[in-house]
Image (spheres, rainbow, N blue to C red):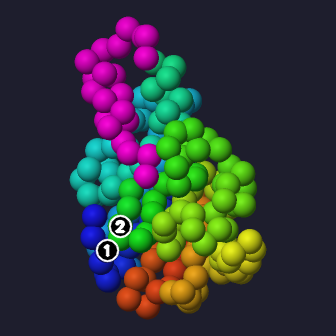
């Protein structure tokens, strides 16, 4: 997938809160987002009946989604179950979700930029010694969810600098550096607008109610 200069809307961890999911999409589109990504846990393992509704929202608004730990858990717990046709269709949608998506040098995943289980379950802290090496891996910015707490980490050889996060403010990034950006959770009213042309990121509050 080729990179673009238009704003990119990024969200994660809506956990079946489909009204908030729709609010996040609406808010990011209103700010000019031309591409939209959901970084996993669009569903919740405690509310699998909401899968179809959530996936329909993503499809309608052309949101690219990766698999989170809740999607993996739902698939695991239902692999030998007797399911209706509708349930089978829902699980098929989850099964087809990728673990990572690349847009040029920008990488999108639920947790860590590797295959399962790192992509969905393992905390990013386990991989920081590897990710701070200049030869590993090949991304300029990793956008991730999972931890629910918005953050920006600037990676340098053998070192990490945490950049302060403030909602609603464009935070400039250095094109010569690499970053890990945790976008926060839709469930806790957080999302991100990435501005490739300006090379800046803005944390966007998700409205609790539709306006």
Q: Nearer the viewer, residue 136 or 78?
A: 136
Q: Quadrant of residue 198?
A: bottom left
Q: Nearer the viewer, residue 41 or 18?
A: 41
Q: Residue at x 31, y 22 (%)?
A: 88
Q: Is residue 30 visible?
A: no
Q: Residue at x 72, y 60 (%)?
A: 129
Q: Nearer the viewer, residue 166 or 8?
A: 8
Vertical side of 150 occupied by 118: above or below: above
> Marks 2 and 1, how far apart in space?
5 Å
Q: Nearer the viewer, residue 165 or 99?
A: 99
Decide whether residue 87 is among the magenta residues: yes
Mark with earlier residue (2, 1):
1
Q: Is residue 184 left or right of residue 27?
A: right
Decide whether residue 148 is among the magenta residues: no
- SS class of the residue under badge 2? strand
Residue 67, image x, y percentages: 45, 43
Q: Which residue is mark 2?
A: 103
Q: Quadrant of residue 211?
A: bottom left
Residue 35, image x, y percentages: 31, 69
Q: Residue at x 35, y 70 (%)?
A: 104
Q: Which residue is mark 1?
A: 3
Residue 196, image x, y percentages: 40, 83
Residue 106, image x, y percentages: 43, 69
Vertical side of 174 occupied by 104: above or below: above
Q: Residue at x 48, y 68 (%)?
A: 139
- Position of the N terminus, as image quadrant, is bottom left
What range is drawn magenta here?
79-100
């Amino acid at each position: 997938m080729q990179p673009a200069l238009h704003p990119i809307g990024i969200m994660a961890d809506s956990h079946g809160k489909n009204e908030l999911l729709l609010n996040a999409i609406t808010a990011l589109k209103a700010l000019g987002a031309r591409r939209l990504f959901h970084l996993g846990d669009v569903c919740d393992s405690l509310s699998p009946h909401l899968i179809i509704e959530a996936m329909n929202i993503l499809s309608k608004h052309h949101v690219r989604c990766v698999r989170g730990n809740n999607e993996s858990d739902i698939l695991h717990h239902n692999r030998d179950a007797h399911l209706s046709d509708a349930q089978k269709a829902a699980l098929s949608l989850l099964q087809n979700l990728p673990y990572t998506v690349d847009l040029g040098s920008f990488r999108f995943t639920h947790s860590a930029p590797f295959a399962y289980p790192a992509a969905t379950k393992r905390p990013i802290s386990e991989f920081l010694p590897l990710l701070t090496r200049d030869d590993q891996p090949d991304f300029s910015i990793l956008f991730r969810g999972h931890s629910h707490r918005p953050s920006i980490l600037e990676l340098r050889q053998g070192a990490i600098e945490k950049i302060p996060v403030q909602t609603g403010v464009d935070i400039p990034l250095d094109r010569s550096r690499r970053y890990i950006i945790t976008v926060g959770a839709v469930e806790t009213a957080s999302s991100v607008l990435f501005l490739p042309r300006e090379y800046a990121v803005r944390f966007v509050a998700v409205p609790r109610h539709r306006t």
